[in-house]
Image: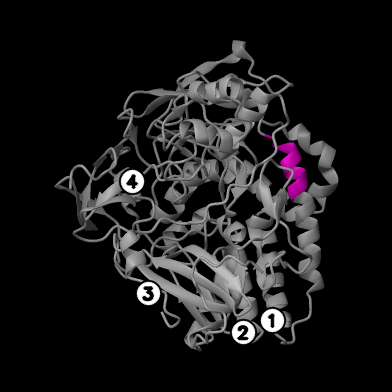
Amino acid sequence: MSRLTVDGEPLEFRPGQTVGAALMAAGILSWRRTTHRGAPRGLFCGIGVCFDCLVTVDDVPNQRACLTPAREGMRIRTQEGTGHDQL
Amino acid sequence: MTSYDPTGYDPAGNDPAGYDLAVIGGGPAGMAAAATATRGGLRVALIDAGPGLGGQFWRQPAPNEDATAFGEADAAGYHHDLATFRRLRGEIFRARADARLELFSGHHVWTAACGPGGVRIRAVDKLSEPGRDIERIVSADAVVLAPGAYDRQVPFPGWDLPGVMTAGGLQALLKAGGVAAGPRVAVGGTGPFLLPVAAGLAMAGSHVVGVFEASATTAWTRHAGAALANPGNLAEGAGYAAALARYRVPYRQRSMIVAAHGTEHVESVSVAGLRPDGHVDTASVRTIDVDAVGVGWGFTPSLELPMTLGCEVSDGDDGSLAVVVDADQRSSVAGVYVAGEACGIGGAALAVAEGETAGRTACRDAGLEADPSPAAARTIRRRRRFARAMAVAHPVPPAWQDVLEPSTIVCRCEEVDAEAVDDACRNHGATDARGVKELNRAGMGWCQGRTCGYAVDCLAARAAGIPMTPQPAPRPVAAPLTLGALAADDAGPDH
């Protein structure tokens, strides 16, 4: 197992998984809140089409969790709105 | 030939790094095209968005040396016809070792242009340094587009809750991540694809509370000829049906998931039976506790690149557009071949046959010897017939419009609800998705209407009292990229 962090908390994952798969495996279903309604969102299409699963990866906002391979030491941050306000 | 060239490519310029053929897409069609073309003597660039080959059908975990990794062996049980995948991949890897093929994995093609000098493809490498887009330009004499397809969706109350996913999304999570989305899962929509999704989840240990299929298998009896001509499909379907029976998964025909409930995530679904006219039997609604939901209403071809290159598209008679190709997979644009789901949804075996055919045609058009394959042509004819029967047997029932509430989100990106879409149509004259978008931004967000476009076209057509016809939605930027990646590029010929 390898390890990344989600909002500073450690999360173990199996290499080969995406960030989205690692989060789902840990029982985390949402990691973003929408701009207008503040609604929670996580994986939907799972293949990079819908952009619902956006997350901040190593300080870069709006990365698709379903396409981003999880890597050792990666810093994942949950997102509010456009993802740019917390930078 | 297209006259507009967004890349500023000088067709007269000689690009020393040019290839004989570029293949975009590393799924069944693209793998078959690349393998066939290298076998025929062409030097090929295979460009694929995934970390490894296989596309969505043979979706693989990211390659990794770690012994604790989730790897191909773990995923094998969720796959169909891995033998073909391994044969094609072996051929592609051998060609790469001999420098007859270059593989660009993790590369998202965001645009392409063609002229008399060939095709120029612009991609961003999203794999080497996550978060930092690195642009790469590939030039080739000709191109095979094999962009595949994605799940067709229609909105329903609660479909934006975390834990509600597309059926393909559930499958991808399982194949590429080894993760079952939840301990209790409901699967719904229509089409044979729901069977392997449910069977895979059951094999992975989830309790599948039911498969809610809107059609009835009796719909098949009208197309028995097409089914009997495709015994492979029947055997595959029977295999999944046996797996569902073994895990005691209820298979409910003429039924659908009409709502998902929860606050922070899905906690239950309402399901209902459908009347013979395709509308909801309101007396039959019941609620089932679940942790995850997967819904799919067939698939929609990815047409961004074919449309950017000017390929002619037409109504694929299943509510989606598809690229028009001749019997040799040539599109309406010289030097652009298209294979697989972009030519109409038909499954992996058809995609492989079309990819092989496109590869042969590219060789022949380049002056190499490559006779047409009668076997591939037969497969294509038979599978196309089967695909048409499928589309007829598995329509999206009108019931989905019955269950919308005014506050149901239709456009997930811009959070436009059914009431706003209705207002745009009934009070402001919108008759298609494009008209609705101009009024309330539905389809204008991150996904560019890929998720809501079909539903908004249907809703607008209904409000206008006209039949729904799929509308072309050109998307000049096929994949997102940072302005930084663009700024770093000087568009020089040897990039």
Give the class, few, some or many, for how many residues have Cα within 10 Å of label 3's Cα (few <14, many ≥20): few
Q: Which mark is residue B490?
A: 3
Magenta residues, start to end: B387-395
How far is disc 4 from disc 2 in space, using C-alphas?
Answer: 39 Å
Give the class, few, some or many, for how many residues have Cα within 10 Å of label 2's Cα (few <14, many ≥20): many
How far is disc 3 from disc 4 in space, using C-alphas?
Answer: 29 Å
Q: Secondary structure at mark 4?
A: strand
Q: Are labels 1 and 3 on one chain?
A: yes
Q: Are labels 2 and 1 on one chain?
A: yes
Closer to viewer: mark 1 or mark 3: 3
Q: Which residue is mark 1?
A: B363
Residue B37 place in picture, x, y as percent: 64, 79
Residue A28 place in picture, x, y as percent: 29, 39
Q: As displayed, is residue B163 above or below residue B78?
A: above
Query: Contact, CB < 8 Å: mark 2 with mark 1?
Result: yes
Residue B18 place in picture, x, y as percent: 52, 83
> At x 47% / y 31%, what residue is drawn?
B440
Q: Which mark is residue A54?
A: 4
State the scheme by which the image is colored: one colour
Q: Which mark is residue B42?
A: 2
Q: As displayed, is residue B155 above or below residue B65?
A: above
The rendered magenta stretch, by its main secondary structure, is classed as helix
Closer to viewer: mark 3 or mark 2: 3
Q: Disc 3 residue type?
A: Asp
Give the class, few, some or many, for how many residues have Cα within 10 Å of label 4's Cα (few <14, many ≥20): many
Q: Is residue B238 left or right of residue B56?
A: right
